[in-house]
Image: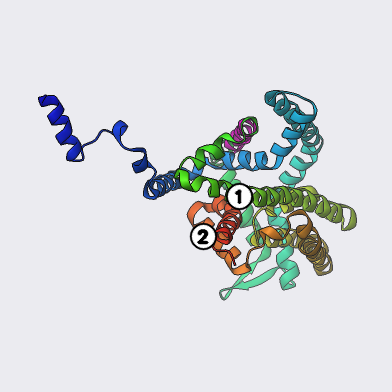
Amino acid sequence: MEERTEATSKKAAGDVPLAEKSPREWESPWVSIALLAALGLLLLSVRQILPPFVVGASLAYVFSPVVSQIERFARLPRLAAVLVFLVALLGPLAVLGWLLEPTLVQETKALFSNSPAILNNLLVQLFGGKSLSIAGQVVDADTVASYLLDAMLDFLGTPSQAIHVAAVAVEAALDGFLSVVLLFYFLLEPKRFAQAAVRLLPPQHRTAAQEVGREIHSVLSRYIRGLLFLVALMAAATWLGLALLFHLPYALPIAMATGFLEIIPFLGPVVAAGIASVVALSYGGTSLALAVALYYLVLRQIEDQLVMPVVIGRAVEIYPAVAIFAVLAGGALGGVLGALLGIPVAAALKVTFERWRPV
């Protein structure tokens, strides 16, 4: 009798074990907000390890419908459909990498080793001679190029720095392998993570959240699919122009850089055009540099006016000032990865806001 009285008094005082709490207490919106805030802080604190997860999830966004089609039409288990898809995807990519690797590695090494000479030629083209004035001091262009070359060799020749470069290369290879492994798991059970995310919300809001989630999924999958297409398209178009039309040295690494820089909004295409124009100015003078810059401008206009509305659509359109803020805010919070995620996050927030506050 005394034990029952003591238990009753504990409950009256609010000292209730977690297992005895009413389900309604756990369904409070504040509990969901606290869980989402804790999850956001956790992801922010471990953002250095997120790139393979982001790459794997992004590729799963793009290719999950393809795996579902294989599963449906071939009447295969999900595991077999995923394996068939990965073999069909990675096989041609491995062959393409094997074919391009010698030229890409050779031209990339030559580009880095000849970068001081390229800079030297650039200075001569810009200033019309081998000497230039910097802060009142007359500096010889050859001296600047030699200084840069010595600095680069010093950087690569120091044992600790060489180990650092090797560590970065190994880390990149491991990240690539981990991205493929995560892609496998994301494709194998594509709905599990979405269902877990919905369970963070109170039951009365889950139906609406699932509807918004489907709209966000449609927008983001279209955006990522279109972005990957643009990367391949710009790399191929740039290589055709630089190698076959302008006969520019190092066309393959510049074209590959141009394609991947498409991922970085606003700044990436400008940097890509700048790299190609600098090499063109160094090797062919002002006329070749202007021609290359004009070629990049035409490609950009074709992409913006014709390709992007078709492959991405209007659903991802964001007001330019908001897009710039999203990229800069993402970069401030998460570095390069945050800048890359700025536009997708802004697009998801746009869909959520339009559903929450319709016109």
- Of 330 and 280, which appears nearest the observer? 330
- Image quarter of the C terminus: bottom right
Residue at 29% x, 32% y is 20
- Of 285 and 347, which appears nearest the observer? 347
The amino acid marked with disc number 2 is: Ala
Residue at 79% x, 26% y is 74
Give the farthest residue toward the front. Answer: 1
Pointer 2 local density, CA inside 10 Å: few below 14, some 14–19, many at least 20: some
- The answer for how far apart the CA atoms under marks 2 and 1 are is 32 Å
The amino acid marked with disc number 1 is: Met
Residue 65 lies in quadrant? top right
Residue 116 lies in quadrant? bottom right
Pointer 1 local density, CA inside 10 Å: few below 14, some 14–19, many at least 20: some
Q: Which contiguous range is marked in magenta?
A: 169-186
Pair 2/1: label in front = 2
**Left or right: 121 as drawn, with respect to 48:** right
- Image quarter of the N terminus: top left
SS type, badge 2: helix
The question of residue 175 being in magenta is answered with yes
| Tag 1 residue | 152
- Of 262 and 6, which appears nearest the observer? 6
**At which x and y percent is residue 120?**
71, 61
SS type, badge 1: helix
Q: Is residue 43 visible?
A: no
- Most frequent secondary structure within the magenta stretch: helix
Disc assigned to residue 329: 2
**At which x and y percent is residue 97?**
77, 36
Residue at 52% x, 53% y is 335
